[in-house]
Image (cartoon, rainbow, N blue to C red):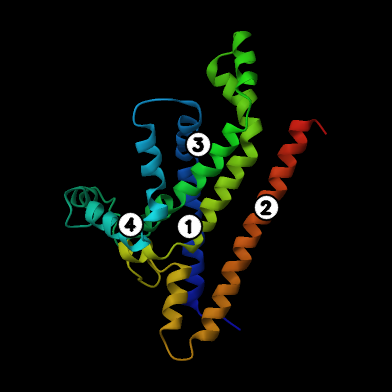
């Protein structure tokens, strides 16, 4: 089974989009996860609901909302186009769609990791006069790193497999916005395209399994370092 040039382009674009989406989303997801896990404030339940909204909305609805907000006919979209930062029908829009769709999964994994850390460890460090940022960097961060890695992998995998919001927001333009899921969908629409689709499905599965295996290796190394072995 072989893949044509368009399919390889789709794979490269999917990897590019997934990597950018993961890198950009991890810091924001970690901050939101920390706020939800450690802070009490008015509107916390609203923030939590907004974070998880993409999980319950149909992906095509999320894509359409992005199109309404950032489309070329929207005020914000026109401003971005003027600045050369247009998102609709551009690969950068696929990154935004992937971030939004994977964000709840990343926040959830990181929040669980943060909630598993005993706050008394942080309080003990604070009584020694350690600055708050130093406490986070030296005490909390090493303990929650496996959760961060898990969230990053989940976000990456979601970005690799994102279809509904992406195709609605950036369309399915070969070589420009056609990601691997879109290429698989396209292959299934043409006669005798099943073999090509199966090849791409196997390749996508291989990439996803590789990402999971890498995260497991990194998590075990972090755990051994924390344990001092």
Q: Position of residue 61 (x, y in %)?
A: 31, 60
Q: Quadrant of the C terminus?
A: top right
Circle 4: element type: helix
Q: Secondary structure at mark 3?
A: helix
* Mark positioned earlier in the residue sequence (1 or 3): 3
Q: Is residue 95 visible?
A: no
Disc 2 is placed on an element classified as helix
Question: Considering only order in the chain, which callout, 1 or 2, is on the residue closer to the N terminus?
Answer: 1
Tell me where residue 169 sits by quadrant: bottom left
Image: 130 above or below 83: above
Closer to the camera, 94 or 146? 146
Between the residue at mark 1 and the residue at mark 4, the CA separation in whole angstroms equals: 14 Å
User: Badge 4 is on which residue?
Assistant: 62
Residue bearing mark 2: 214
Q: Mark 2 or mark 3: name the one nearer the start of the chain.
A: 3
Residue wearing tag 3: 30
Q: Nearer the viewer, mark 4 or mark 2?
A: 4
Distance of label 2 from label 3 (alpha carbons): 20 Å
Residue 39: x and y, percent?
A: 46, 25
**Labels 2 and 3 touching (C-beta < 8 A):** no
| Towards the viewer: 19 or 55 | 55
């Amino acid at each position: 089974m072989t893949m044509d040039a368009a399919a390889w382009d789709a794979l490269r674009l999917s990897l590019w989009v997934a990597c950018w989406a993961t890198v950009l989303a991890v810091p924001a997801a970690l901050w939101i996860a920390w706020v939800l896990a450690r802070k009490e404030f008015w509107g916390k339940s609203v923030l939590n609901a907004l974070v998880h909204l993409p999980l319950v909305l149909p992906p095509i609805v999320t894509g359409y909302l992005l199109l309404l907000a950032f489309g070329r006919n929207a005020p914000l979209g026109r401003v971005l186009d003027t600045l050369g930062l247009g998102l609709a029908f551009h690969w950068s829009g696929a990154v935004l769609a992937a971030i939004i769709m994977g964000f709840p999964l990343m926040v959830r994994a990181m929040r669980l990791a943060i909630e598993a850390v005993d706050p008394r460890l942080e309080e003990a460090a604070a009584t020694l006069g350690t600055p708050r940022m130093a406490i986070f960097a030296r005490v909390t961060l090493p303990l929650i790193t496996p959760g961060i890695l898990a969230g990053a992998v989940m976000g990456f995998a979601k970005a690799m497999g994102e279809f509904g919001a992406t195709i609605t927001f950036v369309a399915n333009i070969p070589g420009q916005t056609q990601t691997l899921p879109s290429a698989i969908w396209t292959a299934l629409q043409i006669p005798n395209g099943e073999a090509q689709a199966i090849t791409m499905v196997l390749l996508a599965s291989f990439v996803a399994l590789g990402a999971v295996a890498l995260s497991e290796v990194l998590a075990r190394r972090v755990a051994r370092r924390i344990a001092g072995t």
